Image (cartoon, rainbow, N blue to C red):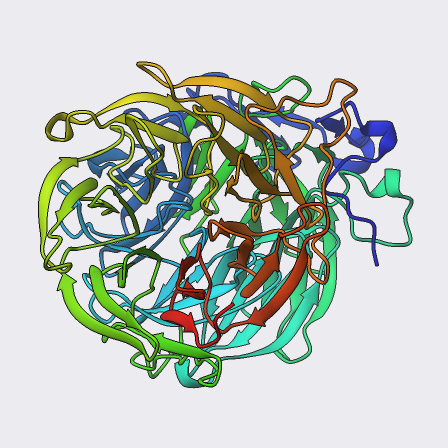
């Protein structure tokens, strides 16, 4: 196995930034000339014959600019939580015509027939009607399986890259009502590109491009993989050539670790005339650099030039007139905010006739003169067929009872009260199900545009309803399917229109999140006038990382993915942050739950840590003591049955583990299962495990434990 270079080698342990610029004589063989322009602080350089001319900053756009897409005479800009629509009839004089906000963490944009498909990471996929550019309107929000990262669209199918979960294929025949077709796992899909029946997925940490035969949605299959010398991401195509941007660390095992560190930045060119056997023909390296975060790389080809956005390294123009010998012809940087970085992160690039548009985080968007630039004339070619196909997610009928909504929708969460289960089913609302030893019986349905999460406490149902906010319902004790609204909080913040997860710890507060802005604590003493009492930022990401309940009479825990574990004191008028540990850094699958008088947390090693209330970091800086679960790795979301059993689910690995914690110091796995759906936090009912399993439906074990 290769060395995992997600972390710096020992001699770089104290550094987050590595910026080793290659000697100019090696990297840039021509004398640089700076182009004149009106983009404040931006540096525009040409190395030899001028590629770039003047640069002009586009006004009226949030400086947190992330995504660009050109379609005809229109430029689409994703910045902060907005989608902007601009007229580029005059390429160097873009005019913002309209915008729509509340879209969360916008990452990428694809456009077809005036409909914009906006991948917004934690917030999912937004589909926006921009045919009236002065008044773009949200048509729908699609509840994708994981972080909506890479996006492309062809005909009636959208393709959504979702990191370790792979690529999701979505039926957009009716953009107002998108439906799941299937998902195929890949190493770590960051960007996707479709052309002529084939889909290309840039894989991040593995440094690959996965190539799918996507001509028929009923028969999608991987046909080849391209290996690269760096972490993968953005892709573009031109004729029989594929252009792939890479970053972070070199994958060349023949180099020393120190030489590979930060050495993965560049552009790689492949001949794909034989799609089953692509062949690398050349590459060009960009300066060595490493900074974790804002790590995405995007190429856009225009004639004999590829414009490659390399975040902190800036934007490079690569001359590919001789594709076997590409050379760097120009570079654009914006004023850096990180010490030692050449540029603020260049996040995206789009090409029009005579101009290149460049977005930069903390800076905004600029138009740069480029006389030889031309908008891509290549179409999508052969469009995928059978968009109405729906993949099946079967379960072992000897092990499970299964219930599924009639329409294709994920079962996102379940809450149990007595012999009744309430299942959050996305666009299918909340299903009310009677539980028995022979399975599920649907006894009611609460219709709503979206239900993402549900909890029950004190005879009330708490529901995260997406764009409709957080709702609290009274449950009729004589008729479990009869709900009456007791209160509603429309939104958590102006930046996001979503409530996606909810928890109800003991006391005065409800906890909720939009998955972007951190954890929000809502004062629920007056349900008719709920308000956010306290918010602690730090993106919780995709999973459910909150402990759900309190220990020690007042402390709740939060596992912030890739950041920290933090405690909150919920005993006062407002929640107060307590101890936090950055030494015990969670991964994306590490959750926590109340377990007896402790909080049970899973760590990156797949072991369990039992934390006392408000437990601080160890004084010597060592990791918290963890306990292995005999027979299983449990880097997962835990749930406690109130006795001796703890269940662990991992959405990415599609695994469920049940462990006996009768002996806390020596827990043992008693049941391990792989399922076809993506399992979320389970519930227990009369000794059985109930699992919300995404498109696998709601599952209940036949066996009692």
Q: Is residue 623 shown left or right of residue 381?
A: right
Residue 175 shows up from this direction:
no
Q: Quadrant of residue 78?
A: top left
User: Residue 475: horizontal and vertical position, in percent?
Assistant: 14, 50
Residue depicted at 30% across the width and 14% down the height: 573
User: Residue 575: horizontal and vertical position, in percent?
Assistant: 38, 19
User: Residue 118: horizontal and vertical position, in percent?
Assistant: 33, 50
Judged from this view, the residue extending furthest toward the top is: 573
Does residue 365 lie above or below 172 as drawn?
above
Q: Nearer the viewer, residue 469 or 3?
A: 469
Residue depicted at 18% across the width and 27% down the height: 530
Q: Is residue 454 shown left or right of residue 631?
A: left
Residue depicted at 65% across the width and 17% down the height: 339
Q: Is residue 554 shown left or right of residue 671?
A: left
Residue depicted at 69% across the width and 20% down the height: 340
Q: Nearer the viewer, residue 544 or 242?
A: 544
The number of callouts visible is 0
Q: Nearer the viewer, residue 182 or 641?
A: 641
Question: Which corner quadrant holds the N terminus?
Answer: bottom right
Residue 477 shows up from this direction:
yes
User: Residue 590: horizontal and vertical position, in percent?
Assistant: 58, 45
Does residue 563 lie above or below 147 as drawn?
above
């Amino acid at each position: 196995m290769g060395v995992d270079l997600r972390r710096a080698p020992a001699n770089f342990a104290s550094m987050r930034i590595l910026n080793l610029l290659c000697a100019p004589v090696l990297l840039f063989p021509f004398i640089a000339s700076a182009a004149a322009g009106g983009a404040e602080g931006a540096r525009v350089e040409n190395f030899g014959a001028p590629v770039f001319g003047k640069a002009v900053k586009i006004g009226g756009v949030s400086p947190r600019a992330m995504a660009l897409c050109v379609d005809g005479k229109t430029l689409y800009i994703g910045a902060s939580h907005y989608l902007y629509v601009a007229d580029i009839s005059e390429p160097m004089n873009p005019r913002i015509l309209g915008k729509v906000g509340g879209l969360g963490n916008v990452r990428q944009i694809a456009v077809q027939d005036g409909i914009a498909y906006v991948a917004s990471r934690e917030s999912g996929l937004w589909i926006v009607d921009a045919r009236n550019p002065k008044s773009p309107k949200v048509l729908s929000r699609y509840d994708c399986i994981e972080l909506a990262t890479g996006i492309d669209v062809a005909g009636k199918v959208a393709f959504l890259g979702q990191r370790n979960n792979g690529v999701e294929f979505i039926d957009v025949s009716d953009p107002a009502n998108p439906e799941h077709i299937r998902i195929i796992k890949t190493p770590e899909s960051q960007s996707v590109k479709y052309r002529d029946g084939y889909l290309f997925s840039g894989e991040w940490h593995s440094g690959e491009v996965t190539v799918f035969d996507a001509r028929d949605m009923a028969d999608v299959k991987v046909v080849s993989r391209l290996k690269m010398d760096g972490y993968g991401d953005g892709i573009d195509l031109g004729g029989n050539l594929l252009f792939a941007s890479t970053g972070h660390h070199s994958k060349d095992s023949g180099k020393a670790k120190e030489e590979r560190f930060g050495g993965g930045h560049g552009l790689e060119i492949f001949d794909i005339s034989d799609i089953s056997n692509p062949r690398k023909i050349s590459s060009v390296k960009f300066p060595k650099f490493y900074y974790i975060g804002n790590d995405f790389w995007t190429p856009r080809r225009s004639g004999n030039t590829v414009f490659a956005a390399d975040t902190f390294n800036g934007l490079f123009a690569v001359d590919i007139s001789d594709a076997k010998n590409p050379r760097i012809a120009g570079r654009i940087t914006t004023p850096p905010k990180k010490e030692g970085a050449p540029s603020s992160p260049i996040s995206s690039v789009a090409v029009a006739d005579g101009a290149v548009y460049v977005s930069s985080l903390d800076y905004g968007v600029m138009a740069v003169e480029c006389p030889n630039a031309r908008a891509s004339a290549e179409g999508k070619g052969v469009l995928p067929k059978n968009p109405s196909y729906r993949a099946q997610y079967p379960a072992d009928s000897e092990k499970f009872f299964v219930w599924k909504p009639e329409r294709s929708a994920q079962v996102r969460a379940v809450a149990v009260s007595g012999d009744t289960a309430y299942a959050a089913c996305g666009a299918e609302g909340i299903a009310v199900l009677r539980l028995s030893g022979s399975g599920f019986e649907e006894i009611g349905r609460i219709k709503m545009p979206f239900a993402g999460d549900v909890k029950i406490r004190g005879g009330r149902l708490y529901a995260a309803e997406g764009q409709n906010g957080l709702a609290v319902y009274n449950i009729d004790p004589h008729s479990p399917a009869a709900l009456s609204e007791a209160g509603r909080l429309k939104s958590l913040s102006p930046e996001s229109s979503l409530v996606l997860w909810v928890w109800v710890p003991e006391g005065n507060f409800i906890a909720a999140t939009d998955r972007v802005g951190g954890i929000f604590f809502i004062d629920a003493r007056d349900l008719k006038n709920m308000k956010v009492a306290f918010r602690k930022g730090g993106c919780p990401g995709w999973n459910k990382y909150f402990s759900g309940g309190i220990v020690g009479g007042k402390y709740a825990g939060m596992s912030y993915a890739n950041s920290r574990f933090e405690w909150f004191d919920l005993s006062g008028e407002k929640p107060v942050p307590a101890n936090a540990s950055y030494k015990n850094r969670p991964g994306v699958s590490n959750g926590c739950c109340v377990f007896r008088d402790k909080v049970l947390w899973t760590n990156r090693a797949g072991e369990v840590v039992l934390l006392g209330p408000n437990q601080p970091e160890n004084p010597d800086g060592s990791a918290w003591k963890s306990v292995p679960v005999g027979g299983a790795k449990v880097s997962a979301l835990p749930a406690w049955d109130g006795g001796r059993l703890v269940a662990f689910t991992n959405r990415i690995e599609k695994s469920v583990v049940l462990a006996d914690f009768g002996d806390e110091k020596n827990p043992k796995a008693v049941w391990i299962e792989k399922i076809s759906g993506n399992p979320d936090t389970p519930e227990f009912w009369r000794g059985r495990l109930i699992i919300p399993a995404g498109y696998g439906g709601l599952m209940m074990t036949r066996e009692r434990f």
